[in-house]
Image (spheres, rainbow, N blue to C red):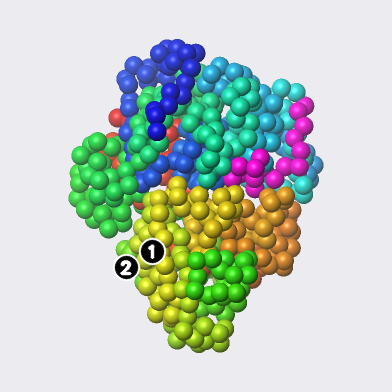
């Protein structure tokens, strides 16, 4: 793919004049880092994936964002208030400009919200949180929600604001579908309000950024002036680049390399628990499974088969053998750092291979069956190795797995709803952007409803109307104790229904050069605003 030049003459002039506050530019601090895969697109509405969205947050911004401790803080909105149960008023920051010099106004917020609801968008669940947005003046908007929503600013921490004028001029008023097709301008070009500007983008090779001199927050801690990001898929190569000093930070570091890096004087490992649950989903919607030996019916529609899957997989063994004891085995889709988590529904299932075999026989599959399992090999910590272990364990009860492990660009383009949802069984990880369990219900558990923005990532089509009713009550409940009781009830119901195969809460695993200060957020997002170089 031809290297893309992403900035115009105005932006180049701005970069040449960089001062970056307190003389930062004069020092020329270049931050070099690597991840196991590339971000999927520069379009902030193309894919709802934490890594892609986290990196886009270096050049795009939202109304409210997170600080290093996941505390909600103002970004493009200076303040907000919940004036009525279904109305929020946001007071927008004045004097903010996009990287091309255009002024940020209420029109950009309304445009971005509408764009999030277009066909190719993977952010429809976010956009659906609003029924309408009214412009009060250039720097004030009133958001009407379909039902009372006590956490709307937190729900929108990844709904990035784009420049309406820029998007219209470049014919990119609709979101780019992750599956590809006709090239969209916003896929390869960016124009945000964030602290850094995209200079060049070479997919799967390198992306370079430059500090934006016109950034509104002059108190940003970071002294970085330039960024070079490179995806490095090979684990050993990634670690070697860190040790040699070629990279300042790499993520993730294979857990098996932690002891080795602890002996390197110029490197340190950061491995706090992440607020992400890793799990396996099963198609419970189609009448006949795709990519399976079973014809004319769908085994996963039978609760006994789903229970057998859960009882056959030993999450403790996966943690010990593959994750080196660094993960936290789960029996739910909720990590323990997420509001609403409770041990009563979050503890792992007790493995019972013999009972699993009997359940399969009782369901009419005494000899088991075969099915394809879709898995990424460059998205989660040890993702392909985990899928291989799951396949081995399921084989012991007669479920033969045809493992298809692919780079995440091909993986997501196969399994997502807007990409055709061509999967019968799949691995996924989920960190709720709101750090609240209701987000998990909305996106992963609720019956699929495109119009209402429900079940956008319910790729297996699980549907339980009783849970949906509880979810609706959770969304409007303002008493925190009562709300958490409803969350507990909903996830207990899901647990007893064996709707998913939960695996574990994965650890974050970053390697960083000594002397460089970074903040390891529990959502596994590296925020450039908090990176300080020696």
**2 or 1: tag closer to the N-terminus:** 2
The residue indicated by pointer 2 is 321
Nearer the observer, 30 or 285: 285
Measuring from the top left, give residue 494's x and y in whole percent. Answer: 61, 69
Visible residue check, residue 40: yes
Residue 386 marker = 1
Q: Quadrant of the C terminus?
A: top left
User: Which quadrant of the view contains residue 208?
Assistant: top left
Q: On the picture, is 290 further left or further right than 323? A: right
* Above or below, 467 relative to 210: below
Q: Quadrant of the N terminus?
A: top left
Q: How many marks?
A: 2
User: Which quadrant of the view contains residue 387?
Assistant: bottom left
Measuring from the top left, give residue 484's x and y in whole percent. Answer: 65, 61
Measuring from the top left, give residue 185's x and y in whole percent. Answer: 54, 29
Q: On the picture, is 348 further left or further right than 106? A: left
* Above or below, 452 relative to 357: above
Q: Callout 1: helix, strand or loop?
A: helix
- For the point 40% across and 58% down, the residue is 405
Nearer the observer, 375 or 104: 375
Query: Magenta segment range?
Result: 118-136
């Amino acid at each position: 793919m031809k290297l893309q030049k992403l900035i115009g003459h105005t932006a180049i002039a701005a970069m040449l004049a960089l001062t970056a506050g307190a003389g930062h530019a004069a020092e020329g601090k270049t931050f070099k880092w690597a991840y196991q895969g590339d971000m999927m697109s520069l379009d902030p509405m193309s894919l709802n994936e934490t890594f892609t969205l986290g990196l886009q947050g270096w050049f795009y911004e939202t109304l409210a964002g997170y600080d290093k401790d996941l505390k909600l803080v103002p970004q493009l909105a200076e303040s907000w208030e919940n004036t009525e149960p279904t109305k929020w008023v946001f007071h927008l920051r004045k004097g903010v400009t996009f990287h091309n010099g255009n002024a940020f106004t209420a029109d950009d917020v309304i445009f971005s919200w509408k764009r999030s609801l277009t066909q190719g968008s993977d952010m429809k669940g976010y956009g659906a949180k609003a029924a309408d947005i009214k412009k009060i003046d250039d720097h004030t908007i009133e958001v009407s929600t379909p039902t009372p929503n006590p956490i709307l600013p937190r729900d929108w921490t990844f709904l990035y604001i784009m420049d309406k004028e820029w998007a219209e001029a470049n014919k990119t008023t609709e979101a780019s579908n992750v599956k590809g097709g006709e090239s969209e301008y916003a896929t390869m070009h960016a124009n945000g309000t964030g602290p850094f500007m995209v200079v060049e983008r070479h997919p799967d090779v390198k992306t370079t950024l430059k500090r934006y001199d016109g950034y509104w927050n002059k108190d940003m801690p970071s002294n970085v002036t330039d960024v070079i990001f490179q995806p490095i898929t090979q684990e050993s190569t990634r670690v070697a680049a860190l040790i040699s000093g070629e990279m300042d930070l790499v993520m993730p570091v294979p857990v098996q390399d932690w002891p080795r890096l602890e002996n390197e004087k110029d490197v340190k490992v950061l491995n706090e628990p992440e607020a992400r649950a890793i799990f396996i989903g099963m198609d419970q919607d189609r009448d006949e499974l795709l990519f399976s030996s079973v014809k004319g019916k769908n085994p996963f529609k039978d609760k006994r088969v789903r229970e057998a899957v859960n009882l056959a997989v030993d999450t403790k063994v996966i943690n010990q053998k593959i994750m080196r004891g660094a993960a936290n085995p789960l029996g739910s889709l909720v990590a323990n750092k997420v509001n609403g988590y409770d041990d009563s529904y979050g503890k792992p299932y007790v493995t019972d291979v013999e009972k699993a075999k009997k359940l399969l026989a009782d369901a009419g599959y005494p000899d088991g069956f075969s099915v394809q399992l879709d898995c990424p090999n460059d998205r989660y910590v040890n993702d392909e190795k985990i899928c291989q272990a799951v396949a081995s364990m399921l084989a012991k009860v007669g479920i033969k797995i045809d493992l298809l492990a692919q780079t995440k660009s091909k993986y997501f383009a196969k399994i997502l709803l807007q990409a055709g949802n061509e999967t019968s069984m799949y691995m996924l990880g989920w960190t709720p952007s709101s750090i609240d369990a209701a987000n998990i219900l909305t996106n992963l558990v609720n019956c699929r409803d495109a119009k209402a923005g429900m079940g956008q990532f319910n790729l297996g089509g699980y549907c339980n109307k009783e849970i949906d009713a509880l979810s609706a009550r959770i969304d409007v409940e303002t008493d925190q104790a009562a709300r958490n009781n409803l969350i507990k009830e909903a996830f207990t119901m899901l647990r007893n229904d064996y709707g998913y195969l939960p695996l574990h809460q994965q650890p974050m695993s970053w390697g960083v050069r000594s002397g460089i200060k970074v903040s390891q957020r529990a959502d596994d997002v590296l925020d450039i605003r908090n990176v300080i170089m020696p």
